[in-house]
Amino acid sequence: MQPILKSTKLNNVCYDIRGPVLARARQMEEDGHRIIKLNIGNPAQFGFETPEEIVHDVIINLPNASGYTDSKGLFSARKAVMHYTQQKNIRDVQMEDIYIGNGVSELIVMAMQALLNTGDEVLVPAPDYPLWTAAVTLAGGTPRHYICDEQAGWFPDLDDIRGKITPNTRAIVLINPNNPTGALYPVELLQEVVEIARQHQLIIYADEIYDKVLYDGAQHTSIASLADDVLFVTFNGLSKNYRAAGYRAGWLVVSGEKRHAKDYTEGLTMLASMRLCSNAPAQYAIQTALGGYQSIDDLVAPTGRLCRQRDLAHAMLTDIPGVTCTKPQGAMYLFPRLDPKMYPIDNDQDFILELLLEEKVLLVQGSGFNWPTPDHFRVVFLPNVDDLQEAIGRIAHFLEMYRKR
Ligand code: PLP
């Protein structure tokens, strides 16, 4: 029999956060090894629990959640999202502009499938959350990576963006607060991105899933609040802000210059209909989350667990010779740089695999985030202080051995 091959559509699609090194780590665990995992941003797994009120309301509503809902989502969930957009100063959002999905992930794939034809280009950040690159590629588009500048606090390099726009460019993706760098973009920078989009008639896709996970009193501005004459598609959900990644609850909001986007939104609605609806029990959590008050102190307060873990992980990593790292202002990741003179790495996936095999610590290599050079890795700082200390101690030991080679 002929081997059964996967579709060629998948030829250039990569999602290395759950790639071959993770498969190896799983195998090691099966063999009885204890691996410290700093690889996936899944808050509940590390004791950042979903607020009780949300869990309670999902349980209460379970008996009502057996049927399909409207393809775009429950009225109550969409209404709550609508109110949220008002709080974020995104103007003129109507109920029909809101789509509830099985997490932001599903909606990113749908948004790209509905937009792109072969040859269309989308500006995606490097480094990025790699689902964006994968979704553009799967939809037949071409991701064009614009550089976020580490020297400038990982802010997008606007000249690089301008230089990469072609007649085929349809959209620009902005991840703010950013995964993997932890950068939070100031209003002035967002305004410049809006101006570029305005000049070149680009859609702005704003992934704002970490908009409440902010440190040091920082404030988040939704880019969609800055203009009415550019089309914005804004993404958010319960996975991070409400520590409910397993519920699979996210939303997408179309705003701004909607008049010319009717055909596109028809496409989105068609794709939403084809998957019938998103997970109904989780939709009941959205109104509770957005309509109520749940403390987020364990994430963001200066004395809160996550903030302390950020400080510890940042201090320990930057203590290692040849390691530098911008301190995150949001999200739950660090993206340290290894000085290539001290750590001449050819293949960063092999480097991360070697670290796993020798020190039993699991990270994701920078190239997994479409970073072009093999000199970065991502650290998730969700594990507790003891585990972080042990893991970064082991990373330091591994790097010391590496320097002595
Ligand atoms: N966008 C970013 C920037 C993320 O970091 C993640 C998950 O890590 C997602 C989207 C996916 O979120 P969801 O759980 O809502 O699918």
Image (tube, rainbow, N blue to C red):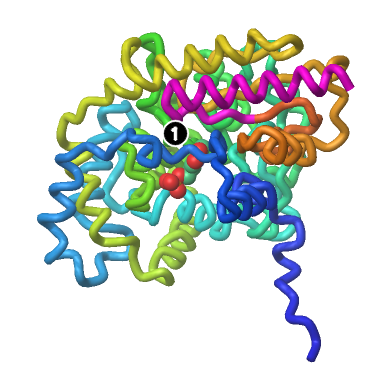
Image quadrant holding the C terminus, namely: top right
User: How many labels were placed on the picture?
Assistant: 1
Identify residue for label 1.
Answer: 208
Q: Position of residue 11 (x, y in %)?
A: 76, 61
Snapshot quadrant of residue 36: top right
Q: Nearer the viewer, residue 382 or 226?
A: 382
Residue at 45% x, 56% y is: 265
Q: Nearer the viewer, residue 390 or 197?
A: 390
State left or right for residue 96 relative to residue 149.
left
Q: Which residues are magenta?
A: 378-405
Q: Is any part of residue 99 visible from this angle?
A: no
Q: Is any part of residue 183 visible from this angle?
A: yes
Q: Nearer the viewer, residue 101 or 232?
A: 101
Magenta stretch encompasses residue 385: yes
Q: Position of residue 148 (x, y in %)?
A: 67, 24
Disc 1 secondary structure class? loop
Magenta stretch encompasses residue 148: no
Q: Main secondary structure of the magenta part?
A: helix
